[in-house]
Amino acid sequence: MSSTQRLEVLDGWRGISILCVLAAHLLPMGPKVLQLNSMFGLLGMALFFTLSGFLITSFLLKNPPVSDFVVRRFFRIIPLAWLYLAIALAIAGASSETWFAHYFFYANLPPKHLVTLTDHIWSLCMEMQFYVGIALMFALFGVRSLLALPVMALMFTMLRVADGVYASSISYYRMDEILAGCTLALIVHQRVDLRLLAFLKKIPQWPLLLLLLVSCHEQGAALNYLRPYLAALLVGTTIVNQESTIATLLNHRVLVYLATISYALYVIHPLLAGTWLGSGDVVVKYLKRPLLFIVLFILAHISTFYYEHWWIASGKTLAKKLRFKTA
């Protein structure tokens, strides 16, 4: 199993995750009574956080300088996020306190400062909080500290169980989804008991997918607490079983392209939904949806390849300079 193949599978999951989120936010996924929009939203974010945790831990297992990690992550996330926030918060007429909470990525913590056009930014807040936390842990205790991540995942899950929270935008009720992805990385890269990797290879994927879907629905009840681990297991089975049907489907070039522009799609889409493109009664609003998607994909493409690309490249250059200075 080559790293290139593995990356294609992960890109496929990232493409699926953004499709789920966009569908949940912009399309009617069925009668409201079925709560399918909520289900697909939770599914998309569970996959996204799993991928994030997996990739971050995989990177840190190479034992890079902490500055390398921090600079790369910040240059990846902040430029587009801050640009979007400048527009969204100006439109909302937000207070200075709200601007501060958004720009320093704690707007999702009680008391929340999120506004209509920034409700989705809770996930970026949680990501940035995770980056800072794991960077500090890594700087203080080194690569071996990553072995504590599975324990931390269980602790956050126990907190959710204790408080009866199936899903939330508050970080401490959702952090186990990222940490489950971190745990998956430790298993795949053989940093924990090898029997776990052998077990991962034997898990049937289609029943696991069904369980994951149920865990994303309110009627799944207590199974919601297992959502982080079911998502991580499903992604893991496609990493270690590259010839499976699901893994093969994930290698489709359309999903790879969607993965490439997924960050921009996620950040930008609520702003468009708040314009004329998303206005009108139910019939008019959904008649406009094809045009909204066209504009969204054009903007996401431009952002990814002509705005974010420059910042990402600059971050890599700065990381290399810092590495040489500390060598």
Image: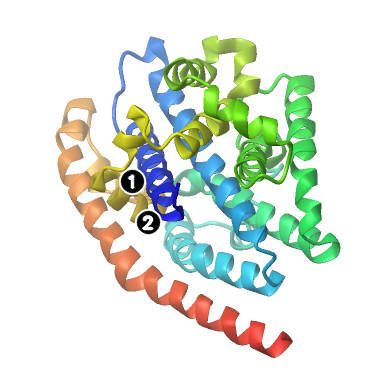
Q: Which residue is mark 1?
A: 274
Question: Which quadrant, please, contains the C terminus?
Answer: bottom right
Disc 2 crowd, CA 10 A, few/some/many (<14, 14-19, 20+): many
Q: CA distance from mark 1 to mark 2?
A: 16 Å
Question: Residue 264, which numbered label?
Answer: 2
Q: Earlier in the sequence, mark 1 or mark 2?
A: 2
Residue 262 in the image: state x and y as whole percent: 37, 51
Q: Is residue 110 above or below residue 322?
A: above
**Which type of secondary structure does the marked residue at label 1 adopt?**
loop
| Residue type pointed to by label 1 | Gly
Q: Nearer the viewer, residue 142 or 96?
A: 142
**Residue at 65% of width from left, 44% of height from top?**
182
| Res. 114 visible in picture | no
Residue at position x 50%, y 17% in the image: 217
Residue 21: x %, y % from top left: 40, 37
Q: Is residue 103 left or right of residue 15?
A: right
State how the image is colored. rainbow
